[in-house]
Amino acid sequence: MSSIFTQIISGRLKCYKIYEDDLHFAFLDISPLTLGHTLVVPKKEVDYIFDLSQKQYTDLWNCAKKIAKGIDKSIPCTRISISVVGLEVPHVHIHLVPINSIEDLNFSNKRMKISDEKMMGIRDLIVSKLF
């Protein structure tokens, strides 16, 4: 059974896509910790980040850096935080979370519910600021 992220990448499930290249895919988290919370994933389904080859690992982080810079230009925040938890979905993913305090990165916090219209606006803003 393919992961939920593989289903998103293939277009079988809806997402708010931020970026795509031959190896990576980035999209807004549909239950974000903060506005602009984005997931960056390799297209190849690998469960554990340290099982990636050195090249895959480096390429993923380089992609995440590019996306983080676009988020930083789009969402008012103090920092773009990074988290790799890897327990909730068996597909490597990097969380990029705009934060103003350490409490903003607490995954136990209640997740935001954001309208489709607002999610599309956030997506469009970030996409316009990439690269």
Image: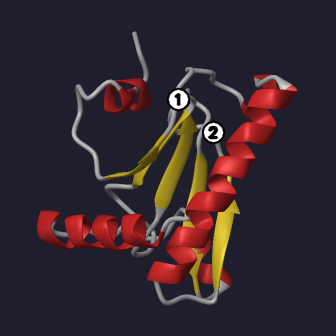
Amino acid at the residue labelled 2: Gly
Q: Secondary structure under badge 1?
A: loop
Count of numbered marks = 2
The CA distance from mark 1 to mark 2 is 22 Å
Comparing 94 with 75, the one in front is 75
The residue tagged 1 is 22
Specify whether residue 106 is in view: no
Instruction: Measuring from the top left, give residue 21's x and y in whole percent.
Output: 50, 37
Looking at the image, residue 98 sits to the left or right of residue 79; the answer is left
Q: Is residue 5 above or below residue 70?
A: above
State the quadrant of the C terminus.
Answer: bottom right
Judged from this view, the residue extending furthest toward the front is 131
The residue tagged 2 is 86
Instruction: Measuring from the top left, give residue 120's x and y in whole percent.
Output: 22, 64
The residue positioned 55% from the left and 27% from the top of the image is 90
Specify whether residue 119 is in view: yes
The residue positioned 73% from the left and 39% from the top of the image is 59
Judged from this view, the residue extending furthest toward the right is 54
Instruction: Measuring from the top left, give residue 87's x and y in whole percent.
Output: 60, 37
Comparing 76 with 125, the one in front is 125
Comparing 57 with 111, the one in front is 57
Amino acid at the residue labelled 1: Asp
Colouring scheme applied when the structure was drawn? secondary structure
Quarter of the figure with residue 23: top right
